[in-house]
Image (cartoon, grey):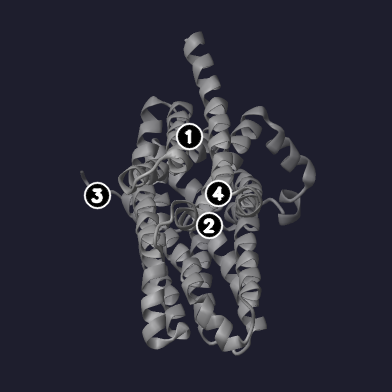
Amino acid sequence: MVWQYRHTVLTLCTLAFTATMVARLIISPLVPSITAEFSVSTGAVGFALTVMWTAYALVQFPSGVFADRYGERTVILASVGLTAVSCLLLAVSPSFVLFAIVAAVLGVGAGLHYSVATTFLARQFDQVGRAIGIRVSGGPIAGLVAPVAAAAVGARYGWRVAMLLGVAAAAPIFVAFALRIRTTPPAKPELSMRSRFEFGPLRELLGRPAIAHTTLIAVGGAFTWQATASFLPAFLIGYHGYSAALASLLFSAYFVVHGTTQPLMGGISDRIGRDETAAFAFALGVVGYGTLVVGGGTAVIAVATVVVGVSMSWGAPIQSRFIDVLSEDERAAGFGLVRTVYMLLGATGSVAVGVLADVAGWATAFGLLVAILALETTLVAVPALRRRMRG
């Protein structure tokens, strides 16, 4: 394969996503040290993290508007640069109030990247599914490496030094992106920022049948992903009686599989169709989560965890489905808008599954995920079957 400029774009967009994910994930292992440093409760730090992730979700739509006005390169550079600066400020924060404010800024910085990079890649690749899959794989890779590295550095040198891992991840990518990515002209420089936030056009876009249907699918997928990321280790410990070490090992395996199968799932969706690939992913989830609930034995649960990892790679075909139904001049702001909507609604997965586990037990909580994925399978399989019957 001859290396082309588009491959440089894909590589640096993937690394930029990895850097922004590293910056967000290094905080969690450092929570005990942060609470001790500032003499605050775990709940207070948890609230700061919730604000950070909420800011990340909310900025998805404005990021697309900024890209239309200023160009993708400028917005992605702002994202990576703000991520690096935020991590530095977190490391030197003199008070918890300032720490929490900067955490929110970190969420904004990291959130500027994703939607804009997706539309940027859509300009470079005809078969965008595989490209999106490769870029998305940067997140799970960060999820595997960042918490372990932060815990190790924090234990030896303190949490403030560990926060600098975010700077170390983002700063070199900022420089490389600035040097290697060409200036991108804005798509709609003439439009005012105010006009892009008018309610009528936003409601019209979200109300289109294809957009509304895909958003509904994405909400269910995001709900399940969020619940899994929050509670899979706790489920393995509380329901199956595994040690924390074994549960963490299986959780790492989940992230590895999730990351490595994203490009494969995106590539398959380019060949056989978005709905067919997504239906396969969601159906695997029914099997995987169902086995986690009813299965026994470490080997069986390990296989089920791998299946769940493949299933949660639904993002590549579903996000490509959004790109397919949005016109080129709508993609930046439109994709950001639907990302904000489905991420905010999907974020309730952590709360819903956590409460259900407390009230009714882990089997019922993870059984809910099986039911949701069964519905998801139907939502994407029916349109695919209709098209094949017409064809």
Q: Mark 1 points at which residue?
A: 286
Q: Distance between the residues labelled 1 and 2?
A: 19 Å
**Residue neighbourhood size for the residue with mark 2, other residues' Cα within 10 Å, grouped as few (<14), some (14–19), many (≥20):** some
The answer to whether 172 is drawn above or below residue 243 in the figure is: below
Pointer 3 residue: 3
The residue to which callout 4 is attached is 362
Residue 155 percent coordinates (x, y):
39, 82
Mark 4 vs mark 1: give the one in front.
4
Measuring from the top left, give residue 114's x and y in whole percent: 51, 54
Q: Quadrant for residue 245, please give it.
A: bottom left
From mark 2 to mark 3, how far is it between C-alphas?
A: 39 Å
Distance between the alpha carbons at the discs numbered 3 and 1? 40 Å
Circles 2, 3 touching at the beta carbon (< 8 Å): no
Q: Please name the amino acid that badge 3 sits on.
A: Trp
Q: Identify the amino acid type marked 4.
A: Trp
Q: What residue type is labelled 2?
A: Ser
Camera-side mark, 4 or 3: 4
Mark 4–mark 1 Cα distance, whole angstroms, equals: 16 Å
Please state if 208 lies on the left or on the right of 78 as rendered.
right
Badge 1 amino acid: Val
Q: Position of residue 161 (x, y in %)?
A: 43, 84
Q: In this view, does 90 lie to the left or right of 283?
A: right
Between circles 2 and 4, the one closer to the viewer is: 4
